[in-house]
Amino acid sequence: MENHPENNPEYSGLAVNAGVAQPPVVNPYLKPRRRVPLPSASELVDGILKGDVTRLARAVTLVESVAPDHQALAREVIEKCLPHSGKSRRIGITGVPGAGKSTSIDVFGLHVLRNGGKLAVLAIDPSSERSKGSILGDKTRMEKLSQHPSAFIRPSPSAGSLGGVARKTRETIILCEAAGYDNIFVETVGVGQSETAVHSMVDFFLLIQLAGTGDELQGIKRGIMEMADGIVINKADGDNIDRARLAQAQFRSALHLFPTPPSGWTPEVLTYSGYFELGIAEVWDMIDRYFDFVRENGYFERRRHEQARYWMYETIDAELRRRFYDDPDRAARIADAERLVLSNRLSPFAAAHNLLDY
Amino acid sequence: MENHPENNPEYSGLAVNAGVAQPPVVNPYLKPRRRVPLPSASELVDGILKGDVTRLARAVTLVESVAPDHQALAREVIEKCLPHSGKSRRIGITGVPGAGKSTSIDVFGLHVLRNGGKLAVLAIDPSSERSKGSILGDKTRMEKLSQHPSAFIRPSPSAGSLGGVARKTRETIILCEAAGYDNIFVETVGVGQSETAVHSMVDFFLLIQLAGTGDELQGIKRGIMEMADGIVINKADGDNIDRARLAQAQFRSALHLFPTPPSGWTPEVLTYSGYFELGIAEVWDMIDRYFDFVRENGYFERRRHEQARYWMYETIDAELRRRFYDDPDRAARIADAERLVLSNRLSPFAAAHNLLDY
């Protein structure tokens, strides 16, 4: 589906291909050298509900696997964990490369854990491949957090598509919540539309920005600013403090141009320093106030319901598209249709209906 | 498809339901009292190519009609006009209610016509119903333009959905271009996602804004600012000049926060007064420079191709959704699935697959 607008950032909106019904591929890296029998669903679920990190990790690995027997087991575990899920704050974190996301997540995470509870840190990276993104690599990025006993950190799952990655991350959230993780960070990594996917599975969306040099701010991706419930300007330290405050003023001014979001919450812009651990408490105070606000006015519940509904319909729509476009007999006709449309010999609508009615 | 995310502005992105394959409904208002035979396609096409406004108007009425024989004739006319289409500047115009859009279109239109050529003014209003939106009403809104011999003004088509309205407008563009209209305005009217539909069928997207009172700007819809190739602040006259210039500075500052759009063109912010006809030439100079710029760097051609491709795929996707969701046997199962998902008894993904595999 190369030319499908889904893959065109300008037009694809929220076209996230859920990428379900993957072909049965057995990945040699996942095949155990000795045939260890799979645990039972009950065993995994019992362990998860008790907060057993080993069983949680095992279950997450099954969710990420493409092997059909792993997937079947994973589905059973997810459905059994579902009634025990939902009781966490899901916080999405995005930021331009170089904004200091990893350092910030490290510092934010430790701050949150000081109040007790448990924290899971997940990631969505559509470019993630099985051979890349070692768990060790991620853990050295968030050095202190990775050593904290109440923190559970996973790299992005790999999948054939952004939709597949998003789905597996959402399912992992369910497992983590069932295991008692009451704060969940979902980080976006890399380019593409991972921000939109993350936004559709979290309660609060945090945008980490940097001050620019002079009056030029580092450009942010189209549409991201409007998704943010909070914008935090990093590296507000030393010589950079004035630039950070200027950036804060500019973002506040820009946000002023937009209407109040559906949440009723006015997004705030704060400065902080991840490296020197300044302003961290204020950032979390903002997030606490947000959750109080949206629980009070009912938006929290409404948003969770909208998201669940969205994922159901998006999964259906993506599968309908997959069934249509992945039909090999159709591919040649689609290419012909495109050619006729681009050369103005057939209107897009006539071309569409020829393909649909064949 | 009430609960479909397509109808949720927060999540539906560019979900425009092309609304094709409408049931054969014969509207009594369209049925002629005496049976006048339909013209032939050749007769209409010949007239259109000669610039005959009466035949053009007749053809547009056929495009807008839901009667099956009208639709069949319209399709034939469109396909015959297609090779003669494409040679215009398609300019989308949007603005908040009260921004003075009609007065501005009147003034902009007359300015454009001073250089010769012909101008068509179309509209997309998803709430348009057959009984509303009298042609007379629209013509009194654009008083001078409606009397100009080289101007062709149509109100929004009515249709079952935004997608239907959008499709008919795109087809009307084809007819107008074949009739020699070298400038085409497409205006957005009303609420909803008409801006996105208009953006996907024009070359240049103009946003008309107002200055607020004090430092509070009139809020603009989420995502619209980033679609704009030019932002023009109206009512820069008399006492309001300072506020207009302040608004101009604020919008310029906000635009600075975004990366350069795919066109490579840096969107500009100008002030003008539609009522007093000030700054009009500067606005059109900006638009002329835009067209020179994007023809030069190839983006004009690329965008037209992307849009044609988008409409083909969007039409297919919308019809796939319609076939699935409008199936009456399925409606009850969808409602049940939603209930289970919202009460956390079934994951959205399991629910989706139950519905797909039934």
Image (spheres, coloured by chain):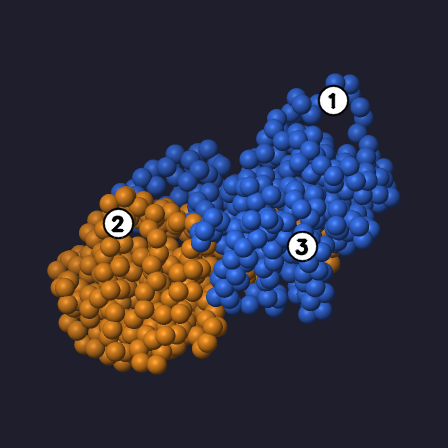
Chain colours: A orange, B blue
- Pointer 3: what residue? B279
The alpha-carbon separation of the residues under discs 2 and 1 comes to: 59 Å
For disc 3, the chain is B
Q: Disc 3 or disc 2, which is closer to the eye?
A: 3
Q: Nearer the viewer, residue B322 or B297?
A: B297
The alpha-carbon separation of the residues under discs 3 and 2 comes to: 45 Å
Circle 2 Cα neighbour tier, 10 Å, few/some/many (<14 / 14–19 / ≥20): some
Mark number displayed over residue B337:
none
Mark number displayed over residue B32:
1
Viewer can see residue A37:
no
Q: Nearer the viewer, residue B357 or B144?
A: B144
Could you say whether the residue bearing mark 1 is in a helix, strand or loop?
loop
Q: Position of residue A163 (x, y in %)?
A: 42, 60
For disc 2, the chain is A
Q: Nearer the viewer, residue B182 or B61?
A: B182
Q: Is residue A341 left or right of residue B253?
A: right
At horizontal 87% and vertical 44% (from top left) the residue drawn is B50
Q: In the picture shown, does residue B329 fall above or below A115?
A: above
- Pointer 2: what residue? A293
